[in-house]
Amino acid sequence: MDKIKAFFAKDWTMEEKVLLSLTALFGGIILGILFAPVRSINCGNNSGNSGLSKEDMANMEGEEE
């Protein structure tokens, strides 16, 4: 916390301090996006809708009997 207070107590204009802070923030966001592990994209909520056709569903119902 003392380092942050010392940073804002330096003889810089407020615009320079804000610019440096935003640069660090956005730089961290970009690095986080670049180095994040790639995961498979899944559209939907996996609520049980299998997306089978009517014929496939009829075949499955026939197998259960």
Image (cartoon, grey):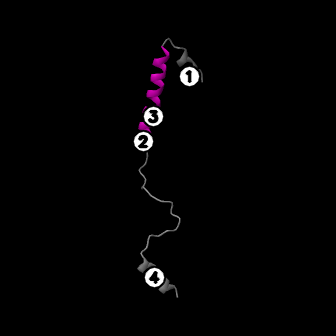
Label 3, label 2: how far apart the Cα atoms are: 9 Å
Q: Earlier in the sequence, mark 3 or mark 4?
A: 3
Q: How far across and down, in percent of the image, does residue 6 sit?
A: 55, 17
- SS of the residue at dot 3? helix
The residue lying furthest to the front in this view is 54
The residue lying furthest to the bottom in this view is 65
For residue 41, above or below residue 23: below
Most foreground residue, 10 or 42 = 42
Q: Amino acid at mark 1?
A: Ile
- The residue identified by callout 2 is 33
Label 1, label 2: how far apart the Cα atoms are: 26 Å
Q: Which numbered dot is residue 58?
A: 4
Task: Indicate the quadrant where residue 19 lies.
Answer: top left
The residue at the point 39 percent across, 41 percent down is 34
Label 1 crowd bin: few (<14), some (14–19), many (20+), radius 10 Å: few
Q: Amino acid at mark 4?
A: Ala
Q: Which mark lies nearer to you, 1 or 2? A: 2
The reply to whether the C-beta atoms of the residues labelled 1 and 4 are less than 8 Å apart is no
The residue lying furthest to the right in this view is 1
- SS of the residue at dot 2? helix
Prevalent SS, magenta region: helix
Label 2, label 4: how far apart the Cα atoms are: 45 Å
For residue 15, above or below residue 26: above
Range drawn in magenta: 13-32
- The residue identified by callout 1 is 4
Q: Amino acid at mark 3?
A: Gly
- The residue identified by callout 3 is 28
Judged left or right of residue 20, residue 3 is right
Q: Amino acid at mark 2?
A: Ile
The quadrant of the rendering that contains the N terminus is top right
